[in-house]
Image (cartoon, rainbow, N blue to C red):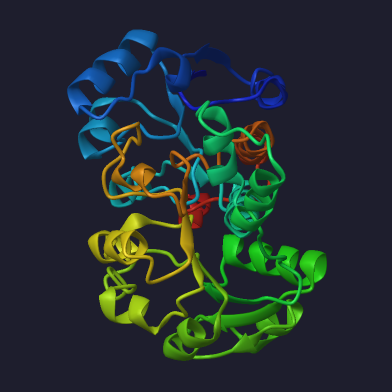
Amino acid sequence: MKAFVTAPFHELGFKIIKKYMDVKYENWRETGILYRDSHDYIEKINKEKADVLITEGDMIDGDVLISCDIKIIGICRGYPDNVDMDVATKKGIPVFFTPDRNADAVADLTIGLMLCQLRHMTTSDRLLRSGTFFVDTGEGLADLYRRFMGWELKGKTVGIIGLGGVGFRVAKRLKFGFDAKILIYDPYIDEKKIKEVDGKRVDLKMLLKKSDLVSLHAKVTGENVGMISEKEIKLMKPTAYFFNTARAALVDEDALFEALKEKRIGGAGLDVFGSEPVDSDNRFLVLDNVTVTPHAGGSTFDAEIRQSLMIAEDIEKYLNKKKPKFLKNPEVLKR
């Protein structure tokens, strides 16, 4: 067997799969190549004579699956939505994936964005780097402390929208690390999960009205696109902060921008945007009450190690006729 690996993959994972197959490694984050065109991908797979694909963002559509002799697929992402699952399952190809591989990473970044906003880390850093701010009088020193006086997380009311893998971890960090009060809006989560973070279930309207910080962690569905619109933003306290490390499609970005520009809410920390990749043209960068990160919430060395081991260990179990943990189409095991 031979694996063509384009996902970021750690040596710990390679150590496992190299016991069973040869490996061609071309990390897309180093090559800059994502195979979105099936013709190019088919040509590359057949050239490498690969029958195992381990990828993050390459498109494995029906044409790829029909034109190539693929035996195993590993997807280093939370859901294998870049694979034609119907064709893969019909052909008996197992598709392994990595749910919550970067949930801790995104949760950490969310907390970081909250602290940046509450303590004005971004604005103070920008000002000091500008070369225009100097403190040479007592009055200037007093102005410095007035300007950057912030808030503590302890005791604040934080509204978590979506108590899935990331939302649950954010809530745990806030409750047990900062003693925050947790409000939860998630129609699909059971009460037991809410109790684990000592949270209180509320509807979305109540959450937006009562929260000092609102953190968005829902998955995008047909029902919740644009769930945070101008109407919802108007429910928030004028001192409240908004955080989105989930998906841009959940928010009316224009309405959020205007609310922040007019300072109708306190500020925001944003990692996802309607137009990506993010660079210095991002319009939110002109606002002094926003911290912007370039959709890097899940990008940690730890997440890379975790996803590599999840895929490699499951492939090893499959090859040794043991039950894998993260197989999207378990029905192929019956064949």
Q: Position of residue 84 (x, y in %)?
A: 29, 46
Judge left or right: residue 175 versus residue 119: right
Q: Tell me residue 194's x, y (percent).
A: 66, 82
| Left or right: 163 as drawn, with respect to 176 | left
What residue appears at the point 59 percent right and 54 percent down from the top-left corner? 147
Q: Residue at x 74, y 82 (%)?
A: 198
Q: Is residue 48 above or below residue 249?
A: above
Residue that sits furthest to the top in the current view:
47
- Compare residues 260 and 301 and report the one nearer the observer: 260
Residue 204: which quarter of the image?
bottom left
Residue at 72%, 25% (x, y): give it: 12
Q: Residue at x 62, y 35 (%)?
A: 300
Residue 54 sits above or below residue 258 on the image: above
**Residue 87 in sight:** yes
Q: Is residue 268 above or below residue 49?
A: below
Q: Where is residue 19 in the image (x, y as percent from the top left)?
A: 69, 19
Residue 143, horizontal then vertical, whole percent:
62, 51
Looking at the picture, tell me which residue is in the foreground, 240 or 193. 240
